[in-house]
Amino acid sequence: MKTFIIMLIALAVPASAQESKTAAIPRTADGKPDLSGVWQSGGVSLYGDPTDQPKPAPNATPAPRPQPAPYQEWTLAKVKEFTDGLAKADPLARCLLPGVPRITTMPMPLEIVQTPKKVVILYEAFHAFRIIPADGSKHIEDPDPSYMGASVGHWDGETFVVDVIGFNDKTWLDGRGHFHTDQLHVIERYRLTQDSTIALEVTMEDPRVMTKPWVINMTLRHPPRADRVLEYECAENNQDVPHLTGPQAVAR
């Protein structure tokens, strides 16, 4: 009898631990992981350079090492040209929308509003927003090119997957001159973790400038000011814009 009781306890512990682990992730009424809230990607400057990153939680899974940008040989000279003239060449210097995925790396927070039929992302940076259908909608044929692209989403188990097409060629993928064409295709995968962060994997494809898909990973955390996003006005925050002159003031 004693042996039987011990066996029952041994069997019950893993199940209880598993239930506790699952309960740690907040969920919506329809059972999906709840991504709602104010988030920020951490210490990243306007030009995409890492600064002081917040320390991850003790049980957090380390992010994969970043891959170098898999650009075709002919693009390297143009990337270097943009990098050398960064202050004038960067589209952000002219207060243009950062595009996807760069806007997520901006040093300003974003807010995710999740409903069963759509997910809305409100960015403090540049008054930007994205309304992402989450009901299985497909892309419309030949969307008009835009800075932020056209997004549709769906749930793949515990991960919210966003498919983005319809870009123009006026943004950079980061702050280091990595440009793209209107053939850019981005896949974002948002996964809520037990340590109250969002693990975001971004895959970028552009057959005109890349040799293969480029995958980057980032972690979204709740910032100290986690109530709401505030107003941001690029023209007032960027006092150098009127002084940016010369041929590099117009990016590709």
Image (cartoon, helix red, strand yellow):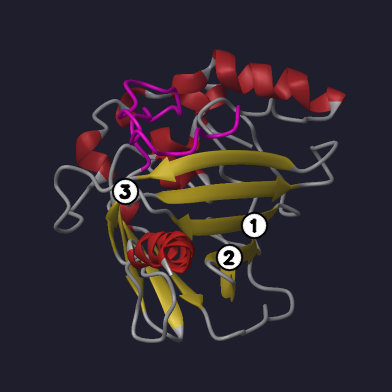
Extreme residue in the top direction? 84
Task: Locate residue 223: give its quadrant.
Answer: top left
The earlier-in-sequence mark between 1 and 3 is 3
Contact flag, marks 1 and 2 (Cβ < 8 Å): yes
Residue 211 has which mark?
none
Contact flag, marks 2 and 3 (Cβ < 8 Å): no
Task: Identify which amino acid the numbered label 3 is placed on.
Answer: Ala
Q: Nearer the viewer, residue 83 or 220?
A: 220
Q: Of circles 2 and 3, which is in front?
A: 2
Pointer 2 residue = 162
Q: Position of residue 176 (x, y in %)?
A: 56, 25
Q: Say what secondary structure mark 3 lies in.
A: helix
Pointer 1 residue = 187
For residue 119, side relative to residue 239 (left or right):
right
* Magenta stretch in the rendered image: 41-65
Q: Nearer the viewer, residue 243 or 169?
A: 169
Q: Is residue 131 above or below residue 205?
A: below
Pointer 3 residue = 125
